[in-house]
Image (cartoon, rainbow, N blue to C red):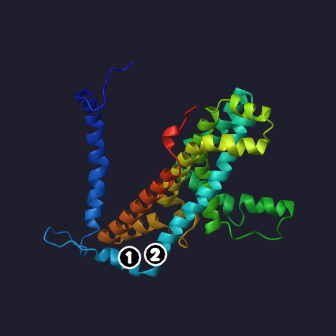
């Protein structure tokens, strides 16, 4: 048993290196970005006064506000889709697959594709979504359409399809963990009391897996909000999210305005995480 007391000198000494690293790698750069967003003009000088004019310009431009709304909307749509699909996969793996070896094999089939580069996985979707791609050829083969569908590539639909394949695993893993920690005696006892399977799920299983659901949704939300490669590769130049806007403004030399978008992106992420954490106490993750 550990004898290390909370807030003791030894605990501060052990946490010190990690705290300094977080300060240097996360806190200081974030504060610097927030400071740059308050610059008036493109040039850098300590004598230049700080101002909120850049934020006012951002919200005064409907195109930029629309990009902000599209980014949040895409994150919410992805949370809904990956939440349902990820929970279904997790429930099937834990509840319906009884043999541990087969269960592990199926989970590895889900995980192994994510060992490759995210950029490679993004580019690999282009041959699937194109006019002559795999999806269109399959639809033509089964007679579902009489000509290739052009709505898959360089569209919001294509971006969503690609992101579902990328981020479903993030919503699945925490749910698998919480499902495996539910004692089998709980649903069995409910069934002995003549509870229907649907009632057992809604009254016992789902509430106990809520911490895993929230953890997964936080991971999906943060990754989708920060995703720019998928929109750039799959959406072409027709669609853009806040991450793409940051790159565009940075490459054009508008550092202060790029910092404004970055700060708003971080604030949207923090707000979303705060709302999700209010829904359930994630400290119950894995609790029996």
Q: How far apart are labels 1 and 2 at the CA level?
A: 7 Å
As drawn, is 268 to the left or to the right of 19? right
The quadrant of the picture occupied by the C terminus is top right
Q: Please report the residue visible at 46 percent of the width from the left and 54 percent of the height from the top.
A: 273
Q: Could you say where residue 131 lies in the image, as x and y percent from the top left?
A: 71, 67
The quadrant of the picture occupied by the N terminus is top left
Q: Could you say where residue 252 lies in the image, as x and y percent from the top left?
A: 35, 72
Question: To which residue does mark 1 refer?
Answer: 58
- In the image, residue 44 sits, relative to residue 25, either above or below, namely below
- Mark 1 lies on a secondary structure that is helix
As drawn, is 88 to the left or to the right of 230? right
As drawn, is 119 to the left or to the right of 98? left
Give the quadrant of residue 60.
bottom left
Asked if the residues shown at circle 1 and circle 2 are in contact, with their CB atoms under 8 angstroms apart, the answer is yes
Q: Could you say where residue 71 lies in the image, as x and y percent from the top left?
A: 51, 66
Please tell me which of labels 1 and 2 falls first in the chain: 1
Question: To which residue does mark 2 refer?
Answer: 65
Tag 2: Cα neighbours inside 10 Å, few (<14), some, or many (≥20)? Answer: some
Give the quadrant of residue 21.
top left
Q: Please report the residue visible at 58 percent of the width from the left and 63 percent of the height from the top.
A: 234
């Amino acid at each position: 048993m550990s004898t290390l007391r909370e807030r003791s000198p030894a605990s501060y000494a052990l946490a010190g290196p990690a705290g300094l690293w977080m300060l240097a790698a996360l806190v200081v750069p974030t504060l610097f970005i927030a400071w740059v967003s308050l610059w008036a003009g493109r040039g850098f000088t300590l004598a230049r006064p700080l101002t909120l004019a850049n934020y006012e310009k951002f919200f005064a431009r409907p195109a930029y506000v629309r990009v902000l709304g599209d980014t949040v909307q895409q994150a919410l749509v992805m949370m809904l889709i990956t939440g349902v699909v990820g929970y279904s996969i997790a429930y099937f793996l834990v509840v319906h697959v009884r043999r541990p070896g087969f269960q592990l094999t199926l989970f590895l089939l889900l995980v192994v594709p994510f060992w490759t580069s995210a950029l490679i996985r993004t580019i690999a979707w282009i041959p699937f979504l194109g006019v002559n791609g795999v999806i269109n050829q399959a639809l033509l083969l089964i007679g579902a359409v009489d000509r290739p569908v052009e709505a898959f590539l360089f569209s919001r639909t294509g971006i969503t399809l690609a992101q579902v394949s990328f981020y479903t695993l993030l919503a699945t893993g925490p749910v698998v963990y919480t499902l495996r920690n539910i004692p089998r005696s709980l649903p069995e006892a409910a069934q002995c009391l003549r509870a229907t399977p649907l009632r057992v799920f809604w009254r016992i299983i789902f509430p106990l897996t809520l911490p895993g659901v929230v953890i997964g949704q936080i991971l999906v939300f943060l990754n989708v909000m920060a995703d720019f490669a998928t929109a750039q590769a799959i959406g072409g130049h027709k669609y853009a999210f806040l991450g793409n806007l940051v790159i565009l403004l940075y490459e054009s030399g508008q550092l202060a305005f790029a910092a404004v978008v970055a700060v708003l992106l971080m604030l949207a992420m923090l707000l979303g995480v705060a709302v999700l954490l209010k829904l359930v106490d994630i400290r119950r993750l894995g609790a029996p």
